Amino acid sequence: MHLIDLTRSDTQPLDFDQRLRLASESWGEDVVRVGELHLEGHVERTSQGYHLGCRLEGEATLRCVRCLGEFALALDEQVELELIPAASAPREDETRLGKTELDVVFFDAPSLDLAYVAAEQVLLSVPMKPLCKQECRGFCSRCGKNLNEGPCECPPETDARWATLQQWRPSE
């Protein structure tokens, strides 16, 4: 664990520079692995709690949803979080969050696990549908060949509903 004691930043901002290797958590089926991550930033006291500002750099290997090939995703994220004591958290069961409240983390003990922050940012950086390249052609639905490596040997599919129109030729 890479814990930061938040109380050390009560009098002056606390700078940190950490290199982390995250445990192979449940990243989901699209994330194959995450390499070493570099987190550099600072924590400073605010009137409500603490402010964390840092930069996350590293690389993750993802699986393309079309061709299932692996590709690298460079991570370079600017992170800004407000750290507020859990005692100040809303007490309602359901609360509608505003745009400014999405970057808030509530804490019980005045410490912050940088591995948690890094893991969250990695997950937020992964696209919903990771593609190795925009023009990825995926697999042939009949023979299973990777169409990025060239065309397959399957005959072209024709829709019988359009057969009459294929025979029609305008007179010249």
Image (cartoon, rainbow, N blue to C red):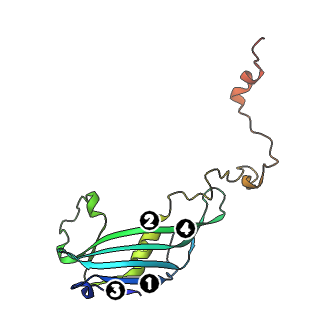
* Residue 169: percent from left, percent from top: 76, 17
Badge 4 vs badge 1, beta-carbon distance below 8 Å: no
Label 3 vs 1, first from the N-terminus = 3
Q: Quadrant of residue 30?
A: bottom right
List the residue tagged with mark 2: 124
* Residue 115: percent from left, percent from top: 42, 80
Q: Secondary structure at mark 4?
A: strand
Residue 102 visible in the shown view: yes
List the residue tagged with mark 1: 18
Q: Which mark is residue 74?
A: 4
Q: Identify which amino acid the numbered label 3 is placed on.
A: Ile
Separation of residues labelled 3 and 4 (CA atoms)? 26 Å
In the rendered structure, the answer to whether residue 99 lies left or right of residue 72 reads left
Q: Secondary structure at mark 1?
A: strand
- Of all residues, the one furthest to the front in this rendering is 12
Residue found 24% across the figure and 58% down from its top = 96
Vertical placement of residue 126 versus 166, above or below: below
List the residue tagged with mark 3: 4
